[in-house]
Amino acid sequence: MLTDHHSHIIPGIDDGSKNVKMSLEMIGCLKKQGVQRIVATPHFYAHREDGIPAYLEKRQQAFDRLMAASPAVDNIILGAEVAIERGVSELEGIEKLAFQGTDLILLEFPYTGFHDWMIEEIENITYNFHLTPIIAHLHRYTEDFSKAQMETVLSLNAVIQFNNEVFETWGGKRFLKRVLESDHRCVFGSDTHNMGARKPNFDLLLKKARPQWIEESDRLLDREKIHI
């Protein structure tokens, strides 16, 4: 089941889809590209939200608007793209931001350079809440992190998520192959935000990726599921 592990299709909740109409266009495009299962991962920034319960309510209301407009939309799993901030691992209920029915949680490094406390936050989330971290679009940080810092990230017991855009550059493909050859668990996602510059792009993945890479990515949710 071809799976998009990272998307911003929920309307009006972050910098992704602006409204239900755009969401339906994005979902329709993903379906035409062969995607059968979409994980919706709207941004969660702890410093911007009034707690996790309020965020979950806002997300559910936006999702309900989408479903009311087109009940035929199915195989959407709710999750979040959680920004790594100081103290985020201490938030009550952070496990509720995991992909529905799994122990998988998508975590995003800030674009402020590497700091040791970021690793501590990831490890606290992993071991205190028994969650499996997915590191969002790690290929974007290859120029910001030193080789040693990147190795520290890769030493975590984490799944590595690649945006399909990784196939657009030689450096991206080289990094992807290095991670895959090191036997890391990897998954793919569109990280789609709109129908313009950040539109769905699974056609790129299907054209450029080896079939076994896609197959391994698509198996992750089923291996990690708790009660989907």
Image (tube, rainbow, N blue to C red):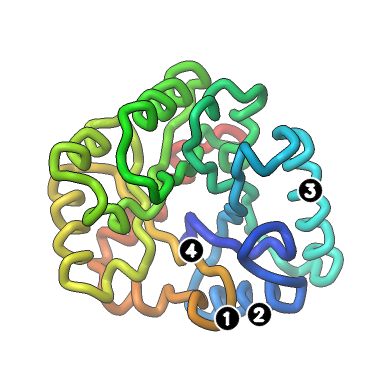
Give the number of the mark in front: 2 or 3: 3
Please tell me the numbered disc located at residue 195.
1
| SS at badge 2 | helix
The answer to whether residue 1 is visible is no
Residue that appears at 49% across and 16% down: 128
User: From this viewpoint, which residue is outermost toward the top?
Assistant: 128
Which residue type does callout 1 highlight? Met
- Which of the 4 image quadrants contains residue 226? top right
Residue that appears at 74% across and 41% down: 56
Q: CA distance from mark 4 to mark 1?
A: 12 Å
Residue at which label 2 appears: 25
Residue at which label 4 appears: 191
User: From this viewpoint, which residue is outermost toward the front?
Assistant: 112
**Mark 1–mark 2 contact, CB under 8 Å?**
yes
- Which of the 4 image quadrants contains residue 24? bottom right
Q: Of 211 and 138, which appears nearest the observer?
A: 138
Residue 166 location, x and y as percent? 29, 67
Badge 2, how many Cα within 10 Å: few under 14, some, many 20+? some
Residue 160 location, x and y as percent? 33, 46
| SS at badge 4 | loop
Which residue type does callout 2 highlight? Glu
**Mark 4–mark 3 contact, CB under 8 Å?**
no
* 167 relative to 104, above or below: below
Which residue type does callout 3 highlight? Lys
